[in-house]
Image (cartoon, grey):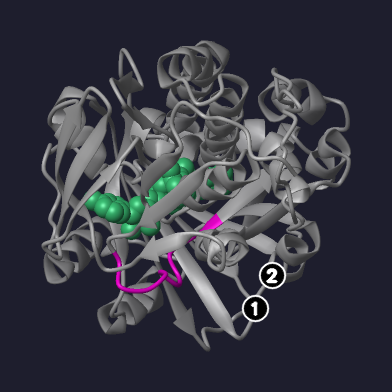
Amino acid sequence: MAQFKMANRTVLISGGGIAGPTLAFWLKAGGFQPTLIEQAPRLRTGGYAIDFWGLGYWIAEKMGLEADINHVGYHVSEMCIVNDSGKRVAGFGTDVFGELTNNRYVTLGRSDLSRLLFEKIKDTTEVLLDNEIIDLDQQADGVRVRLKDGGERAFDLVIGADGLHSGVRRLAFGPQDQFEKKLGYAVAAFEVEGYRPRDEDMYLMYGQPGRMLGRFTMHHNRTLFLFVFAVDRDRLPTALLQQKGMLREKYGDGRWECPRILEELDRARELYFDSVSQIVMNSWSHGRVALVGDAAFCVSLLAGQGSALAMISAYVLAGELLNAGGWHQEAFVRYEAFLRDYIRTKQQGAKRFATALAPRTQLGLLFRNLVTNAFAVPGLARLAIGKEITDAIQLPDYRWPFLST
Ligand SMILES: Cc1cc2nc3c(=O)[nH]c(=O)nc-3n(C[C@H](O)[C@H](O)[C@H](O)COP(=O)(O)OP(=O)(O)OC[C@H]3O[C@@H](n4cnc5c(N)ncnc54)[C@H](O)[C@@H]3O)c2cc1C
């Protein structure tokens, strides 16, 4: 295929999570030359599980990943809320999700999705692991970056796909606290091997006022635990020992399987621990630098769709750069115009959901359980979540000149 002229061609992408490799894939399909830089020395494993459907799923399909995500993923059949003694007090079958999505709905490890996306690009994209941008200097014809390993490079464009705590955002737009909106909750997750009991294809949730603890049975004899709890203080602990201490403090008087799960936590060497936050910015680009995914507009775990949105933003940014012949000003404006309202709606929905996941009062818990049970009534669930789960936008089918799956 004939090489066509591009105003800008070389693109440095910071972050190898979900948005980063997706962007590298589609930039390559558009004829650009991406380089991906990732802070971690190797791809992360473990973490937490994500629900994945809609336009994110559609993009994964277009990347030739449908069989793989279904192979590594799970098809959860029931969401079940249990009481102090482990008895089911509320819940619903998840058939409605299948119905609403044409059975294109899967739960999978975030790190599994990240790995599959990464495998798609690793042989065609320059990848710099264990490295990061420590300084960037925008010039008329490109961006000069200084890297942690001492290297200096120049690129036409730099894209931050480096998540909630984006380094590119800090360097090009300003400090984190200008953009981070904390939702008053924290989240923690860890995995263990050999935990019993196992409840295959079920998501179990135990709640007390302001606290919820979820258990999810995974492949290879592993179990994932997820904590979401209300926090008053602004700063969360960053050291593993203090994070474990905070979970003990919050869940120490919990019943159900709390004592055993906290014992498992004591032995855990890896713990995901962060504030439940959103990122709200007036603009997702500044000169030759733009942001995608959580770095630009983190919707938080409460939207249940952040990965899909990360992929959507990467796909649209690459597509608009292609359509604009590489002219970044035009492409960045169109990228943002296409997604801004859609993302705003997702952020608002996520804020509303916070009170449902970990209600702060006993009455709130009761109400949440009643509503959850109502999901079991055919028709009601469709009515309640239909709008949240079906995508309100349709993605352009860009004409990718170099698409190969
Ligand atoms: C507990 C939990 C549950 C969730 N559940 C769901 C769900 O059900 N469905 C769903 O779709 N989404 C869910 N999400 C949200 C989803 O995980 C995120 O929205 C998604 O991972 C965002 O992708 P990203 O690529 O933008 O950022 P990330 O996945 O965070 O990736 C960022 C990458 O950048 C790297 N990085 C960070 N800083 C730098 C730096 N300075 N230089 C270079 N690299 C750097 C990181 O190591 C990482 O690899 C959940 C999130 C949480 C926390």
> Is residue 379 covered in magenta?
no
At 86% from the left edge and 46% from the top edge, which residue is drawn? 103
Q: Earlier in the sequence, mark 1 or mark 2?
A: 2
- The percent coordinates of residue 357 (x first, y second) are 48, 39
Residue of label 2: 72
Dividing the picture into quadrants, the one containing residue 137 is top left
308 with respect to 144 (left or right): right
- The percent coordinates of residue 148 (x first, y second) are 14, 60
Dividing the picture into quadrants, the one containing residue 325 is top right
Q: Marks 2 and 1: in contact by CB < 8 Å?
A: yes
At 59% from the left edge and 67% from the top edge, which residue is drawn? 119
Q: Main secondary structure of the magenta part?
A: loop
Q: Which residues fall within the magenta stretch?
A: 40-49
**Placement of 91 over or under 256, stated as above or below:** above
Residue of label 1: 219
**Placement of 215 over or under 6, stated as above or below:** below
